[in-house]
Amino acid sequence: MKEKLKLSLPVIVEGKYDKLRVASVADADIFTTDGFAVFNSAEKLALFRRLAEQNGVILLTDSDGAGKVIRRYLTSAIPKEKLYQLHVPRVPGKEKRKKSPSAEGILGVEGTDPETLYRLLAPFAGGSRPKRAGIEKRDLMLLGLSGGPESKQKRAALARAYGLPEDMTANALLAALNILTDRESFLQTAETL
């Protein structure tokens, strides 16, 4: 096993098993939303905002419908320049501790393999924050990834190329790409689709 990543930014995940999985690859302050309980906890939301105010926070929720609802709620409450959104790939399967798969039949953060989590979090190790690539919504539109008749399919193909969930909105994809890649690589990859 690789040495644990040392993260200076706090990580927000959905539940305690997600927290344990992230803690297996990273030495970090990890906070949970306690699933949908975050919607009824003004204190928890205030904590997340306060944490983000200082240096920013990393948001890592599942790629299923519930994870997306929680992500949308937090992205509307935390300034986007203070929020680093990471996405686990949509991988079919069932978490080991569960008797049956989730409603959508995909693995969440807790079921994501340690190597994938390590790769996602590595840009934040050692107190650094990845530079944002400068990819803009306009770029997505010019490349047919937003606002066009086949935009959804094109975004899905681009998301696959980066190991991201295929059903991401244009805004979610934009946020992820600005962390995961640079502008030149993005343009090259998008042009080949």
Image (tube, rainbow, N blue to C red):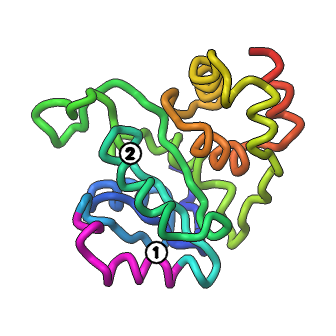
165 is higher (above) or lower (below) than 80: above
Give the foreground label among 2 and 1.
2
Q: Are marks 2 and 1 in contact (CB under 8 Å)?
A: no
146 is higher (above) or lower (below) than 174: above
Taking the magenta stretch, the answer to whether it contains residue 43 is yes
Label 1: how many Cα within 10 Å (few below 14, some 14–19, many 20+)? some
The circle on residue 62 is 2
35 vs 158, left or right, is left
Taking the magenta stretch, the answer to whether it contains residue 157 is no
For the C terminus, the image quarter is: top right
What main secondary structure does the magenta stretch of the protein show?
Answer: helix
Give the farthest residue toward the right: 184
Task: Kindly identify the residue that appears in the image at 46 percent across and 74 percent down.
Answer: 29
Amino acid on which the number 2 mark rests in the picture? Asp
Mark closer to the chain start, 2 or 1 = 1
Whether residue 161 can be seen here: no
**Residue 47 occupies quadrant:** bottom left
Task: Kindly identify the residue that appears in the image at 74 percent across and 34 percent down.
Answer: 140
Task: Kindly identify the residue that appears in the image at 35 percent across and 41 percent down.
Answer: 108
The region drawn magenta spans: 37-51
The circle on residue 29 is 1
Whether residue 64 can be seen here: yes
Residue 154 placement (x, y as % from top left): 65, 20
Task: Kindly identify the residue that appears in the image at 79 percent across and 40 percent down.
Answer: 138
Amino acid on which the number 1 mark rests in the picture? Asp
Q: Secondary structure at mark 2?
A: loop
Of residues 160 and 151, the one nearer the viewer is 151
